[in-house]
Image (tube, rainbow, N blue to C red):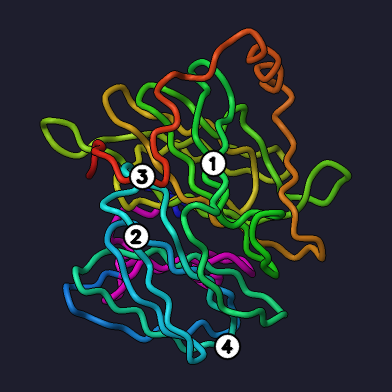
Amino acid sequence: MSEYHLPAGSTAAPPFRTVITPETAGWGYSGLRVLELAPGQAREIATGDAETLVLPLNGGCSVTVDGLEFAVTGRRSVFTRVTDFVYLPRDAHAVVSSESGGRFALPSARCGRRLEPRYVPAEDVPVELRGAGRSSRQVNNFCTPGTLDADKLIACEVLTPDSNWSSYPPHKHDEVTADECELEEIYYFEVSEGPAGPGIGYQRVYGTEERPIDVFAEVRAEDAVLIPHGWHGPSMAAPGYDLYYLNVMAGPGQERAWKICDDPAHGWVRRTWADQEIDHRLPLTSTEEKEGRTR
């Protein structure tokens, strides 16, 4: 295990199954907590200086904040549906409750502006099919620039069918240039189960001579990988197991933007996609609940 690969449960602090703060990550903005609620349970969430989302991983919930109450349908699994969610502003105290119980991701970013809380239905989440061939994947752009108004937070979900690669070609966003912006990033993983039990995937992160980093991690459900800098990718779905990851990004720039630079050794791969079809298994999910290979 490296300092950048956080296995499931290694950062738990009940009622949170995962706790990643700017302090624990050693950076300035991006954070993630995963809240677990038993049936009928409720918890108060203080956002502090960070705008925060309530994003169901499994289960539905009710969110009360600033005198407003939002009913969130949620989903059985990240592999069965695109979900609705709630945006919580900084300096807020919210109550999250669930009749049936579940797990709820709380991606966050330290920010300056306090925006209004709001509910976003699943039908308003743009679903993008990216890449082609064995590099095909689905991206749910629920909190990206141009999709959701936020101050600092950028977040999306990526679903990769078994045997495919995503987050590829390897790319980075750790400096300010005309083609790149500085963003800290968290990858939070879920992996579908097989007949014999939990599945696996793999994540690669590597750096430059000036800023070294070296991660090659076997990832399982509820693992996280921190990316303070460097090239990241591929994210590899092992044969037999679909791979999900939640990306959480934020940085110091005045502009909220996702600008990346491909590793020049591998960027040529993009040009091969023009002659390939998108994987016919995609999209893996939509706003309609379906049977899926769940955890």
> 241 or 207: which is nearer to us?
241
Q: Which circle, 1 or 4, is nearer the viewer?
A: 1
- Check contact, mark 2 vs mark 4: CB within 8 A: no
Which residue lies under the disc numbered 4? 91
Kindly give the residue lying farthest to the right in the view shown.
Answer: 178
Foreground pick, 60 / 26: 60
**Chain-order first, disc 1 or disc 4:** 4
Of all residues, the one furthest to the bottom in this rendering is 67
Residue 73: x and y in percent read 34, 63
Q: Which mark is residue 288?
A: 3
Q: Which residue is mark 2?
A: 74
Residue at image point 50% right, 35% down? 138
Q: Nearer the viewer, mark 3 or mark 4?
A: 3
Whether residue 20 is visible, yes or no, is no
Which residue, given by chain and number where applicable, does mark 1 sit on? 127
Q: CA distance from mark 2 to mark 4?
A: 25 Å
Q: Amino acid at mark 2?
A: Gly
Q: Which residues are magenta?
A: 6-35
